[in-house]
Each structure stands twice: as structure tokens, then as C-alpha cells.
Image (spheres, rainbow, N blue to C red):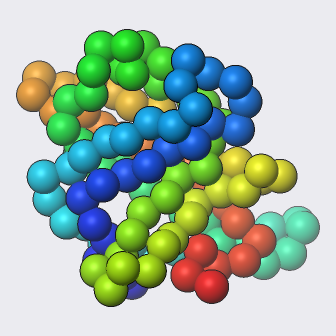
Amino acid sequence: MKELSVRIQVHPVKSMRKESYQFMTSDYFTFAPTLSTSTAGPVYVCDLEINIDKPMPDDMIDFSIFRSCIVNFTDSAGNPIKIGTEEIPAKVIISPNLNTALFKIQCSMLSSPFI
């Protein structure tokens, strides 16, 4: 389990309006991928839900449906953590709330994101 920073970088795998998106959260959060077995073998399930500060309206529209992305975080020691790859991207969606938004990631990776 790692405690992660408040800045989230999202890089779309396919062409979108921006090459990179930045989102902020006012709280630190933890992330613990779980090891699971699938028909393809062992995978790390990296599903995560984070409350973030409400993004710009255009960014909310861009992520109103699941998008294929690579999500980058930094842990409290400054080490980068990447969820998703070009071959197996993470799926990202943002659901608006009144003053915040829910940033949801769905991803299964073949190796741990901490390696």
C-alpha cells in the first residue's frame, strides 16, 4: 500500500482534445493493487476511486465516458507510479458531484505498478 500525492496526470492512449490532463485532489489517498488470477494468469487489479477537485467543464466532457489512458501518480517518497500501458491501458471516467468529482480508474496489469 502506498500513500500518493495530490496531483494526478492522465495521458490518453488515443487522440483526444489534449495530450495530457492534470487533476488535483485535496486529500492524500492510498493505493493497494490486489493480485488476482484470470484465464490469462495472474494480474494486478488496480481499480481505484478518488474524489478530486472539480475539473474544467471541457475536461469533464472529455471524460464523461470511459477513456483509455495511462495514469501517473507520485508516491510520498517521490517515486513515479504508472497505471496502465500502451498495450493494456487503464479506463478512466469522471462523474461530477456538487463541488467535487469522482475520478474512477479500472485497470488490470500484468505486473505490479510499484515495480
Is residue 63 shown left or right of residue 59?
right
Q: Is residue 69 above or below residue 63?
A: below
Q: Quadrant of residue 76?
A: bottom left
One can see residue 77 in this view: yes
Which one is in front, 27 or 17?
17
Point 37% across, 41% down: residue: 22
Q: Is residue 79 above or below residue 101?
A: below
How many circles with numbers are drawn on the protein? Answer: 0
Is residue 101 shown left or right of residue 91?
left
One can see residue 91 in this view: no
x and y, in percent, of residue 72 in the image: 49, 58
The residue lying furthest to the front in this view is: 19
x and y, in percent, of residue 104 in the image: 42, 43
Q: Is residue 111 above or below residue 60?
A: below
Q: Quadrant of the N terminus?
A: bottom left
Point 11% across, 23% down: residue: 98
Q: Quadrant of the C terminus?
A: bottom right
Point 36% across, 79% down: residue: 78
The residue lying furthest to the right in this view is: 40
Q: Quadrant of residue 83?
A: bottom right
Q: Quadrant of residue 15?
A: top right
x and y, in percent, of residue 67 in the image: 60, 31
x and y, in percent, of residue 73 in the image: 42, 63
Q: Is residue 85 above or below residue 31?
A: above
Point 39% across, 31% down: residue: 94
